Image (cartoon, grey):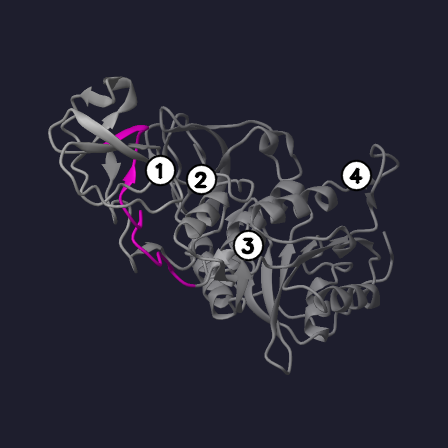
Amino acid sequence: MSTETAPTADRVAAPPPAGWEEARSRVYAVGLAAALPAVARPLADIDGFTLAEPLTTRTDLPAFPTSSVDGWAVRGAGPWRVVGRVLAGSTPAPLSEADTTVEIATGAMVPEGATAVLRVEESTTADGLVRGTPRETPEWRQPGEEAYAGEELLPAGTPVDPAVIGLAASCGHDTLRVRRAPRAALLVFGDELLTAGPPAAGRVRDALGPAVPAWLRRYGCQVRQSDVVGPVADTLPAHVAALRSALASVDLVCTTGGTMNGPVDHLHPTLEALGADYVVNTVAVRPGFPMLLARLADPDGRIRFVAGLPGNPQSAIVALVSLVAPLLAGLQGRSMPVLPQATLAEAVPGRGDHTHLALVRLDRAAGTATPVRHVGSAMLRGLAGADGFAVIRPGTRGEPGDRVPIVPLPLLPGERAS
């Protein structure tokens, strides 16, 4: 590791850490205040974006009565004389005479004057007449059965996935106003890191450079491979240059390591040199201490953020779920993530006056959370087998049977939890 140390003359005592829940609320609020601008985009280009306005339907759904089966649209009691055929995509003439029928396909418009639709498999045809008994329940969909014109179907802040795109198309939309996915970069700090091969000779393999971009993508970020930089040399000029360069083209820069105030931790002096303001500077949570989030404003009003993640791998992921997740929700105009709850299957220790985020595996059928093993700050084995973190509040411990909040690990964009 470099022998160059960060300046010490201007060092001040670290502020008291923010409470975990307070920190999450604070970063969400600043993210929402800096929400990315809304733009109109074609439906084909908005997967992974976020609705900037409520999704409403431009017409009744369905817009006209449509047959839900293949069969016969009939008028009167029958037997019925066949006078035509109706296929999907056409507008039929009215059925104006009693005891007449038209053959009708599923999805076709039901002609005016029809009194019932008879299923083809429940009908017989002989002597040019159709016979059968229509079911009591109508076999067609009424206009507005799914939604009425102007009805709000989804609120602003809804993540756009293929189901949302299909719904918007069915409502008659060609474009929607959306917020784009945030763009993120990663700077890896630490001269002790190897980027290939096994650990050796006092140097450890960088586990966060390959992993953090994938986590960010699961939170809806765009991360280009060219925006993953490191290891950055352990000098203040190198840190300042790397962070300034990364901030030029992204909304969020995540850094790994250097969040302490030690002699070779340059993140705080770098943020000071760039004129950043702290949103959160340390959080009372274990693992994950210390983490930070800073904000920078350009003269033109553009806001960018820096999330300082600890160098220990599991601690870095705790910082992601604690600070980065709510920040990104705000930037996208989404709601603050609501934490589900589960029942502890085993005891979980507390961490004194800090919140404890304990890795757990979920049994969704039983609604239980079981702590996993290998959960040291520098370990990733437990994380690889976990579904999320159980939240053990300060001054408490988790007992079997306790209901506790769960911070889920992020899913792929558009993927829904089972």
From the viewer's perspective, is 385 left or right of 212? left
From the viewer's perspective, is 4 left or right of 7? right
- The mark closer to the camera, 1 or 2, is 1
Q: In the rendered structure, which disc, 4 or 1, sits on the residue that comes first in sequence?
A: 1
The disc placed on residue 350 is 2
- Tell me if I can see residue 354 in this picture: no
Q: Which range is magenta?
A: 53-73
Q: Give the amino acid type for the residue marked by disc 2 in the picture.
A: Gly
Q: Give the amino acid type for the residue marked by disc 1 in the picture.
A: Gly
Q: Are marks 4 and 1 in contact (CB under 8 Å)?
A: no
| Residue named by callout 3 | 46
- The mark closer to the camera, 4 or 3, is 3
Q: Measured from the top left, where is residue 254 in percent x and y?
A: 66, 56
Q: Measured from the top left, where is residue 78 in percent x and y?
A: 14, 26
| Residue named by callout 1 | 107
Compared with 56, 417 (above or below) is: above
Q: In the rendered structure, which disc, 3 or 1, sits on the residue that comes first in sequence?
A: 3
> Within 10 Å of the Cα at label 3, are there few (<14), some (14-19), or many (20+) other Cα atoms?
many
Q: Give the amino acid type for the residue marked by disc 3 in the picture.
A: Ile
